[in-house]
Image (spheres, rainbow, N blue to C red):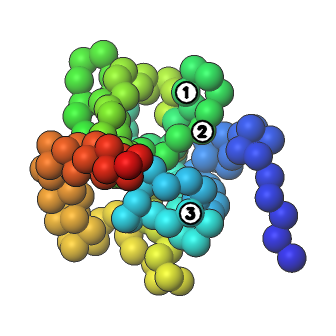
Amino acid sequence: MSKRVAMSELSPLMAETLQSGGEVIFTVTGSSMLPLLHHRRDKVCIVKPQGKRLKKYDIPLYVRKDGNYILHRIVAVKTKGYEIAGDHQCVKEYPVLPSQVLGVVKGFWRDGKYISCDNFWYRVYCRIWVLRYPIRRIYLRGKRFFGRR
């Protein structure tokens, strides 16, 4: 039997686990990272970021100023922080500060199969998906517009 627990309740345990070099695994919720991660189906493995700065295409777990826990992709690294967007979103968030980042996705389970973020085909997907951002933006806005009619 599984139990649903709010991320805010798990945060102290997650921070302790990540600081000690451990891994945190949880099932994702929401649709902002479609088509890569599916709501309540796929799981992610979060680790403490290696080095001081994350890189473009990394997927950090961070806390917004409103207290929400977010898992989105870095689309640009800038001097004031990270520019981040969900794979299924057309709005970028900036700046996300390094101090807001709890961990970074090391890999994920999709349909029960583990895929490392170091996987060649996953890295190709990331680059193509980020390059398609302007087209995705038009597509998603059109989908919302026509979906209302």
Q: Which residue is mark 2?
A: 69
Q: How far from the left and from the top, in percent, is residue 80? A: 30, 16
Mark 3 residue crowding within 10 angstroms, few (<14) / some (14–19) / many (20+): some
Separation of disc 2 and disc 3 at Cα? 15 Å
Q: How far from the left and from the top, in percent, is residue 11? A: 71, 40
Q: Is residue 71 left or right of residue 116?
A: right
Decide: is 148 above or below 83.
below
Mark 1 residue crowding within 10 angstroms, few (<14) / some (14–19) / many (20+): few
Name which quarter of the figure residue 40 lies in.
Answer: bottom right
Answer whether residue 23 is visible to the viewer in this image.
no
Separation of disc 2 and disc 1 at Cα? 6 Å
Nearest the viewer among 129 and 45 is 129
Q: N-terminal of the two: label 2 or label 1?
A: 1
Q: Residue at x 19, y 44 (%)?
A: 138
- Indicate which label's residue lies in the foreground, 1 or 3: 3
Q: Residue at x 21, y 56 (%)?
A: 129
Q: Residue at x 32, y 44 (%)?
A: 145
Helix, strand or loop at disc 2?
Answer: strand
Q: Which residue is mark 1?
A: 64
